[in-house]
């Protein structure tokens, strides 16, 4: 195990094919493949349970997800986690709060209006039925406002307070946490932040620096998702290994 993950709760997500879309140019993205209820990887269910344990009885309904330096697949992780939550019954609001990209633009649950317009109007788009629950997806602004002013504004704080009361979960997909302050600004208003790192790519010093930076800002760091983890044992040998362990 990588020692730099030990100070934080660790959750591992084996990346699916769709996760590679997270940082491809919009022109190259195809139509989003909707995960039917029960199709999402089972480890997202484990992530939900471990988040509840990490909360230790505290409310944990408003969560920020963000990569460390970028290209860790954070958008895919939060998208599929939101789909898993909604399919099991809750009403989930997924917000693309990355003011520099539009990673959720092809999502079938994306409604009209972007985050900037909806905050100013004090509204949200209609929800989409998703399994046993509902999923609402809000896109990032088409034009980039000043992120610090926007996320500190009374309008945004009031809008978020309203959504907390209307949804079971409010999830924010934010820009790389170490490169931009957006995630920390939203994280201070949320119940906590989950850092997404990429196996064999994310650097130990960057993660430690980010953890300290968020803690100094008063952000509750819930844990880390280790994305794109690979089994070093070739698939052809894995059945024999399992038989041997049995």
Image (spheres, rainbow, N blue to C red):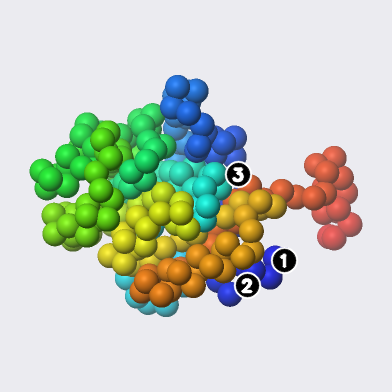
Q: Residue at x 32, y 70 (%)?
A: 59
Q: Are marks 1 and 2 in contact (CB under 8 Å)?
A: yes
**Residue assigned mark 1:** 1
- Compare marks 1 and 2 and give the one earlier in the sequence: 1
Between 111 and 241, the residue placed more toward the observer is: 111
Mark toward the viewer: 2 or 3 = 2
Crowding near the residue tagged with mark 3, few <14, some 14–19, many ≥20 C-alpha atoms within 10 Å: some
Between 114 and 177, the residue placed more toward the observer is: 177
- Compare marks 1 and 3 and give the one earlier in the sequence: 1
Residue 140, quarter of the rendered image = top left
Q: Residue at x 37, y 62 (%)?
A: 184
**Residue assigned mark 3:** 15
**Residue assigned mark 2:** 6
Residue 10 percent coordinates (x, y) = 58, 65
Task: Please tell me how many numbered marks the rendered image carries.
Answer: 3
Residue 185 percent coordinates (x, y) = 31, 61
Work out how far the residue at label 1 is from the one at label 2, CA to CA, in angstroms: 8 Å
Residue lying farthest bottom?
56
**Is residue 217 at least partly visible in the picture?**
yes
235 relative to 34, above or below: below
Q: Secondary structure at mark 3?
A: loop
Q: Secondary structure at mark 2?
A: loop
Check the picture and name the quadrant holding the N terminus.
bottom right
Left or right: residue 241 compared with residue 173: right
Mark seen at residue 122: none
Residue 163, quarter of the rendered image = bottom left
């Amino acid at each position: 195990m990588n020692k730099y993950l030990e100070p934080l709760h660790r959750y591992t997500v084996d990346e699916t094919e769709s996760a590679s879309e997270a940082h491809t140019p919009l022109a190259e993205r195809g139509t989003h493949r909707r995960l039917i209820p029960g199709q999402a990887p089972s480890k997202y269910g484990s992530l939900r349970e471990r988040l509840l344990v990490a909360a230790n009885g505290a409310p944990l309904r408003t969560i920020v997800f963000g990569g460390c330096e970028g290209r860790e697949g954070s958008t895919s992780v939060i998208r599929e986690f939101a789909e898993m939550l909604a399919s099991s019954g809750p009403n989930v609001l997924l917000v693309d709060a990355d003011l520099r990209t539009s990673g959720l633009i092809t999502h079938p649950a994306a409604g009209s209006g972007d985050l900037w317009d909806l905050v100013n109007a004090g509204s949200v788009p209609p929800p989409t039925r998703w399994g046993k629950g509902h999923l609402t997806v809000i896109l990032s602004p088409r034009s980039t406002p000043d992120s610090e002013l926007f996320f500190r504004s009374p309008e945004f704080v009031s809008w978020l307070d309203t959504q907390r009361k209307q949804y079971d979960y409010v999830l924010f997909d934010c820009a790389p946490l170490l490169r931009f302050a957006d995630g920390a600004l939203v994280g201070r208003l949320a119940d906590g932040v989950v850092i997404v790192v990429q196996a064999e790519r994310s650097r130990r010093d960057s993660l430690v620096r980010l953890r300290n930076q968020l803690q100094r800002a008063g952000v509750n760091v819930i844990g880390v998702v280790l994305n794109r983890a690979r089994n070093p044992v070739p698939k052809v040998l894995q059945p024999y290994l399992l038989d041997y362990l049995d």
